Amino acid sequence: MATTDNNSVIVELYDLSITERKDDRFGRVVTTKSLTENDLINIAVARRTDLNPVTLKASMEILKEIAKEQIANGASVSFGLGYFSLLVNGVFIGDNAKWDDTKHSLSVRVSPTADLRSATNSATVDVRGMAETGTVINSLFDVTSKEVNSRLTPSSGVQLAGSKIKIAGDNPANGISLINQVTHEVIAIPSSALLLNDPSKIIFIVPQTLPQGDYKLSLTTQFSNSVQTLKEPRTYLFDYLLNV
């Protein structure tokens, strides 16, 4: 990566258990903060005191609604830091095949703009060694949609693959939770919904009544490779945004 004084990220290392080498590692960028639209507006106002936060918020909402409308009508839209377009999922049989909601669906493809790619490529990277926590989720597979790291289907099975992810210990905070990114409601996955609970793989059922929206998945456990569980639980927040 090229370097600059303006942008910097921290990378931590985790075991890459799928290879034969015992010292293979993969890196993850440390999330230093999670910002909402209101946070971004407040930063903009702090930098430009002539800007009105109410006007900025209203303008953003208007542009989002217009972009959403145009994308849903088949337009390719350059908006913010990405290019948005629709993809068709599913196989059609025959030249005159019709749309079948049980077999076909639309999804959104997002590609970063050149400006965003340039900003990330210019960041200074500080690799600070192995992560303190051994708990890490490498992937999430939604059984119904067959999608990886992107979707949750109510009543569907979900498979998590990772390291030291087994739910263990008697702390009431232990377990899997889904956090709605708009309402911030935390929905706990009941222990009865865990079909498999192993150190490297967990399978659970998504609640049937889970509302539509965007979610982050959080996993908390006291699991340890030793006989004794950890005294304090550790929490891992999955990197990817999951859509219902």
Image (cartoon, rainbow, N blue to C red):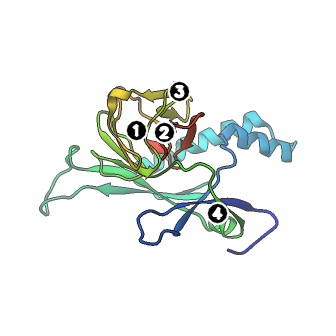
Placement of 80 over or under 38, stated as above or below: below
Q: Which residue is mark 4?
A: 116
* Camera-side mark, 4 or 1: 1
The residue type indicated by label 1 comes to: Val
> CA–CA distance between discs 2 and 1?
6 Å
> In this rendering, would 40 be left or right of 99?
right
**Which of label 3 and label 4 is nearer to you?**
3
User: Label 4, label 2: how many angstroms apart (C-alpha)?
Assistant: 22 Å
For the point 15% across and 56% down, the residue is 97
Q: Which residue is mark 1?
A: 244
Residue identifier under label 2: 214
Q: Which mark is residue 171?
A: 3
> Which dot, 1 or 3, sits closer to the camera?
3
The disc labelled 4 sits on which kind of residue? Leu
Q: Amino acid at mark 2?
A: Asp
Query: Is 196 left, or right, of 44 in this rendering?
Result: left
Asked if residue 50 lies left or right of residue 211, the reply is right
Using the numbered discs, state the Cα–Cα distance from disc 4 to disc 1 in whole angstroms.
27 Å
Left or right, residue 40 beside residue 112:
right
Q: Position of residue 77 (x, y in %)?
A: 51, 57
The image quadrant that residue 125 belongs to is: bottom right
Please tell me whether residue 116 is drawn above or below residue 222 in the rendered image.
below
Give the secondary structure at mark 2.
strand
**Which of the two labelled residues, at mark 3 and mark 2, occupies the earlier sequence position?**
3
